[in-house]
Image: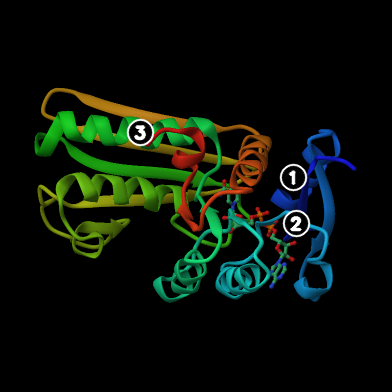
C-alpha cells in the first residue's frame, strides 16, 4: 500500500486547485484521491483522503471545516477573505481536528511576516507604516489576506485594535495622517501573482520590505507541505509559521 499523503482537493478547477493537482501528480509523496468544485458534494468524495485542501470560496470554509471535523479529517485552508462570522466555524472545528489556515503559503511571505514584526519592533512609532499590494485582474477579494495579515502584525506590535487604525486607501480630504494609522493600498491588474510591500517611512529615510511571487507553485508547494505536516497532529488552529517552525 502507498504511504503517499492522500488529498481531497476543494476548488479543484480553479487556478490554485489546478496548480496543486499538477504538483501532486508529479510528486510520489502525494496522491489526489478526490476533487471537488462548484456543484459537487464533498461528502461523496471524502472516504479515501487523509487530508482536505481548500482553495475555493470564503463562504464554504466554515461549513467545510464542520464536515472535516465530523469525519476527523485534517484541513488546510488557503481560501482568503472570510468575515469574522465565517471564521467562527473554522475556530470551532479546530477544537477537534488540526486546521492549517494561512493567507499565504509561500515560504518567502512567511519570512516577510517575521521581518515585518522585527522591523516594527525596532523602528517603533517614529516610522509611519503603510502596505501596498498588487494582484491579477481576476482576484475577487481586496485587500488580500496577506496584506491584512501584515496589517495585523503591525497592529499587534502597536498594541492597538485593527478596526481603530487600519484604513483601506485614502480619498477626499482625510486630514493629516495620525501617528498610528496604517493604510492598505490594493492595486489590481494584469497577471500579477501577488506583490506585497510594507513601508516604514521615517524622517530622512525609508525602509521597504517587499515580496513578489512570480508563480502560484510557491503557494501550492507550501499547501502540500502543510497538508503532510497536519497529519497526526493534535487538534488546533495552526498557521504556516507553525509548519515552518518560525514560532
Ligand atoms: P479561482 O477563482 O481560480 O478558483 C476558485 C475555485 O473554487 C473555482 O474553480 C470555483 O469554481 C471553486 N468554487 C467556488 N465556490 C465553490 C464551492 N462552493 N464549492 C467548491 N468549489 C467552489 O481562485 P484561485 O486564484 O484559485 O484562489 C482561490 C482562493 O485561494 C482565493 O480565496 C484566493 O485569494 C486564495 N489564495 C490563497 C493563497 C494562499 O497562499 N493562501 C494563494 C493564492 C490564492
Label 2 crowd (10 A; few <14 / some 14-19 / many >=20): many
**Which secondary structure lies at badge 3?**
helix
**Residue 127: x and y, percent?**
15, 35
Label 1 crowd (10 A; few <14 / some 14-19 / many >=20): many
Classify residue 149 as left or right of residue 102: left
Q: Nearer the viewer, residue 79 or 49?
A: 49
Instruction: Kindly identify the residue that appears in the image at 68 percent across and 70 percent down.
Output: 71
**Residue 22: x and y, percent?**
82, 41
Residue indicated by mark 2: 9
Q: Earlier in the sequence, mark 2 or mark 3?
A: 2
Q: Earlier in the sequence, mark 1 or mark 3?
A: 1
Instruction: Kindly identify the residue that appears in the image at 82 percent across and 60 percent down.
Output: 35
Q: Tell me the quarter of the image containing the N terminus.
A: top right
Residue indicated by mark 3: 114
Label 1 vs label 3: CA separation? 26 Å
Circles 1 and 2: CB atoms closer than 8 Å: yes
Mark number displayed over residue 126: none
Q: Nearer the viewer, residue 54 or 92?
A: 92
Label 2 vs label 3: CA separation? 29 Å
**Residue 82: x and y, percent?**
48, 67
Instruction: Kindly identify the residue that appears in the image at 67 percent across and 42 percent down.
Output: 224
**Which secondary structure lies at badge 1?**
helix
The quadrant holding residue 125 is: top left
**Ligand 1 placement by image quarter:** bottom right
Please determine whether, in this image, residue 102 is positioned above or below residue 28: below
Number of numbered callouts drawn: 3
**Which secondary structure lies at badge 2?**
strand
Q: Tell me the quarter of the image containing the C terminus.
A: top left
Please determine whether, in this image, residue 72 is positioned above or below residue 209: below
Which residue sits furthest right?
1
Residue indicated by mark 1: 20
Amino acid at each position: 500500500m502507498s504511504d503517499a499523503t492522500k488529498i481531497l482537493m476543494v476548488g479543484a478547477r480553479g487556478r490554485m486547485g489546478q496548480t496543486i493537482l499538477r504538483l501532486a501528480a508529479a510528486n510520489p509523496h502525494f496522491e489526489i484521491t478526490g476533487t471537488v468544485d462548484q456543484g459537487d458534494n464533498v461528502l461523496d468524495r471524502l472516504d479515501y483522503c487523509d487530508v482536505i485542501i481548500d482553495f475555493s470560496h470564503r463562504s464554504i470554509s466554515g461549513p467545510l471545516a464542520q464536515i472535516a471535523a465530523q469525519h476527523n479529517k485534517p484541513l488546510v485552508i488557503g481560501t482568503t477573505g472570510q468575515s469574522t462570522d465565517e471564521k467562527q466555524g473554522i475556530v470551532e472545528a479546530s477544537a477537534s481536528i488540526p486546521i492549517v489556515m494561512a493567507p499565504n503559503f509561500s515560504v518567502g511571505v512567511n519570512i516577510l511576516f517575521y521581518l515585518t514584526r522585527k522591523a516594527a519592533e525596532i523602528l517603533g512609532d517614529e516610522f509611519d507604516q503603510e502596505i501596498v499590494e498588487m494582484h491579477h485582474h481576476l482576484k475577487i477579494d481586496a485587500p488580500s489576506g496577506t496584506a491584512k495579515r501584515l496589517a495585523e502584525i503591525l497592529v499587534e506590535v502597536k498594541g492597538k485594535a485593527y478596526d481603530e487604525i487600519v484604513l483601506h486607501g485614502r480619498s477626499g480630504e482625510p486630514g493629516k495622517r495620525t501617528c498610528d494609522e496604517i493604510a492598505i493600498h490594493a492595486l489590481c491588474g494584469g497577471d500579477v501573482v501577488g506583490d506585497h510591500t510594507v513601508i516604514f517611512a521615517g524622517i530622512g529615510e525609508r525602509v521597504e520590505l517587499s515580496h513578489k511571487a512570480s508563480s502560484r507553485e510557491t503557494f501550492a508547494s507550501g499547501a502540500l507541505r502543510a497538508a503532510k505536516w497536519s497529519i497526526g497532529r493534535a487538534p488546533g488552529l495552526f498557521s504556516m509559521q507553525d509548519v515552518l517552525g518560525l514560532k
